[in-house]
Image (spheres, helix red, strand yellow):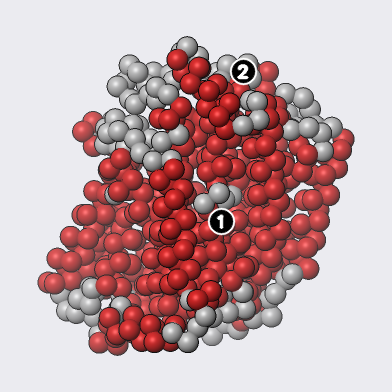
Amino acid sequence: MDNLSYLDIIVIAVYLIGIVIYGISKSKRSSSEDYFLGGRTMTWPIVGIALFSANISSSTLVGLASDAYQTNVNVYNYEWFAVVVLIFFSIFFLPFYLKSRVYTMPEFLERRYDSRSRYYFSFITVIGNILVDTAAGLYVGKIVLTLLFPQLDSTLILIILAVAAAAYTIPGGLNSVIQTEVIQAVLLIIGSCLLTYFAFDQLGGGWSAMMDNLNEMLANGEVDFGNKAEEGKFIPQNSEEVFSLVRPNNDEFMPWWGLLTGVPLLGFYFWANNQFMVQRVLGAKNLNHGRWGALFAGLLKLPVIFIMVVPGVLALLLYNNLDISGLNYGLTNGEICNNLNDCPNLTYPVLLFELLPTGILGLVVAGLMAAMMSSVSATFNSASTLVTMDFVRQLKPGLSSKQLVKIGQLTTAILVLLAILWVPQIEKVSDSLWTYLQLVIAYTSPPAVSTFILGLFWKRANGTGSISSLLLGFSLAVFMILSQWFGWFPAINDLHFLAKASLLFAICIVVHMVVSLLTKPSPEEKIREYTYKKEMFASETEELKAMPWYKNYRILAMILLVLTIIIVTAFW
């Protein structure tokens, strides 16, 4: 791969400096509500774009291309199912979140249950922010900048990336984070469209030409599927199977039953319970803007298959046998990457450097850096909000808003250091970034999802049942991880990670229900204020009658669902 031109370097430098200055200029920190929730003044386009930008981070972007290269469009199932989850979230959960005016998801659990659930979930979420979101974003930045500037030490690269993201997050809070995310999302989409265009242009310019080339390569055995055949895993035989979202039972990435069980579970946690994402909706100016913003984010997820997933599949055609040993990017065991099958996480960087012309390369690399900074700054702000509002404010209730803001800033700086220290461990866990992200969420999300769902829809759920299921779920997750590392129980280790997530969820539901029935019910005010009732739906129906159709979120949700069905059917 060629080195960056001076023009590319100038484009990247100007962007990174500009976005930091812009983020600081949007600082909003006169009170804790301003700093942590942007003053609750966000309109629906800002909420939607911020949700999309925080989700399609650098780690997701690189992860999508990597797993599309390895597993084809199957990875898009996570993207379109987000639409279904966001619709469910908008109808049932969001009204309770905004009405309660909470700062964090753990705080909502305290409103519904008690402080035990709040402290547990807050602690787990902070750890997840560091181990998953922040570290993964820095890891991607490290990969790309190591390729761009191989003479730089990787530790120095991590420090530069973390400091750049923290430069406007620490002084500016959520408003600075969200305002920069809007710009970054636009740049990210433009960059992804350009990359897709040049990839198709390289293959002859059209979809049919690409499909013909793919069929020819598969028929001639030119695509390297590693040891999948020996392991009895699913291998696509033609282009239709490559572009099919539904896979047989022996697919290693996402068998058909995983699409029905594990994917909804992981999606629900990410979009409806995760502070990292929900915090953007908590900053909405009212319920309607929150709902419209969530649906807008769902709409933005639909084209992802064409501009972010398909390029990874096209890498099979273009660079399946490309010699990348000259990149000097070593594997964790000391070997060198000879091709993308050795280092699938390099799929996206290879596409960038091989396809894009001078100037445009700098713009798209700036977009990738933008995505990295977006996700990292978002998790910094999310985690500092959790630490400040769920722990410090509870221990020191007399602190002023300005003092809380200062503590949030200090917390962010500490989290920067912790994330940098964890990044080198990611490659030791999994050779695929996307797999790493999904594995961590699969082990941590089931207890939380069961607690939120039962709390909203079952009046008898109580605090003792909640904390019992949360602690048991955590213990089982740790046991499964240790069993995987040390090879203790092959029967458990051989289970697909989506099966493990579904099993954990079922166990947590049962434990929560049994313990709740054996102990005292929750106080009446918790049940009255924080559980869903049929009367709410009827009352809302009357309110929506006075609205024009384009403001009625139910109609908008139905339109979005129809669009989703059309795309999914096309790739079924």
Q: Is residue 248 left or right of residue 10?
A: left
Residue 429: x %, y % from top left: 45, 35
- Residue annotated with mark 2: 322
- Residue annotated with mark 1: 300
Answer yes or no: is residue 92 visible.
yes
Q: Residues within 10 Å of mark 2 (few under 14, many from 20)?
A: some
Q: Is residue 228 left or right of residue 48?
A: left
Residue 87: x %, y % from top left: 42, 65
Residue 252: x %, y % from top left: 35, 32
Instruction: Tell me what residue is drawn at x 39 percent, y 83 percent.
Output: 540
- Give the secondary structure at mark 2: loop
- Give the secondary structure at mark 1: helix
Name the disc covering residue 138, or none: none
Q: Nearer the viewer, residue 162 or 360?
A: 360
Q: Nearer the viewer, residue 505 or 360?
A: 360
Q: Quadrant of the C terminus?
A: top left
Q: Amino acid at mark 1?
A: Leu
Image quarter for residue 289? bottom right
**Tag in front: 2 or 1:** 1
